[in-house]
Amino acid sequence: MTALTWSLGLVLAALGLLHIVWAFGGLTSGLALVPERDGAPLFRPSRGASLAVALLLLVAALLVMQQGGALPYLVPAPLATLGSWTIAMTFMARSVGEFRYLGFFKRVRGTRFAWWDTRLFSPLCLALGIGTAVIASR
């Protein structure tokens, strides 16, 4: 359980830090970070949106680490449990997707984003969701 807790916490924190880097324009050249239509991104995340996602990922890392027993109590235990279940369900829902551009069941598949989503983003979200559910049930 300790290895799972630390692994999830480190991955969530790394993803949070990566979103901070993206918010300031770093490491984005040539990457397919958002769904595309006709070769153009469907949306362009603002700096504020990227930082908000970063903050949520960093908070998720702390909650999962607390729930898994790797950190001292930062929030009341019932709140950490509820937060961990919310994180687990959010990542599992992301892996399923919205049935058009995101997730395992997307219909649009011929884009660079879809390629990465199928091979990395959705499997990672599913793994994070399942791992967090295991920690949440602790």
Image: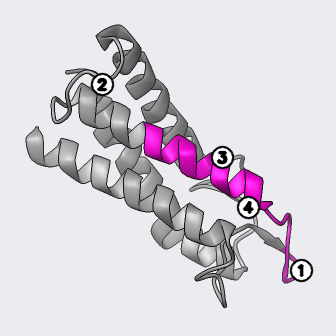
The stretch drawn in magenta includes residue 40: yes
**Circle 3 — which element?**
helix
Find the distance from the CA under tag 2 to the CA under tag 4. 32 Å
- Magenta span: 37-59
Residue, x 66% and y 74% (percent of image)?
Answer: 113
User: How many numbered marks have been drawn onto this rendered protein structure?
Assistant: 4
Find the distance from the CA under tag 3 to the CA under tag 4. 28 Å
Left or right relative to 3: residue 13: right
Q: Which residue is mark 2?
A: 136
Q: Amino acid at mark 4?
A: Arg
Q: Are marks 2 and 4 in contact (CB under 8 Å)?
A: no
Q: Which residue is mark 3?
A: 52
In the image, is residue 90 above or below residue 52?
above
Find the distance from the CA under tag 3 to the CA under tag 2. 23 Å
Residue, x 75% and y 67% (percent of image)?
Answer: 35
Closer mark to the observer between disc 3 and disc 1:
3
Q: Amino acid at mark 3?
A: Ala
Q: Amino acid at mark 1?
A: Asp
Q: Are marks 1 and 4 in contact (CB under 8 Å)?
A: no
What colour scheme does the image use?
Answer: one colour
Q: Relative to the observer, which residue lies in front, 55 or 138?
A: 55
Q: Which residue is mark 1?
A: 38
Residue 69, position in %: x, y?
Answer: 16, 29
User: Residue 51, labelled with which disc?
Assistant: none
Closer mark to the observer between disc 3 and disc 4:
3
Q: Amino acid at mark 2?
A: Ala
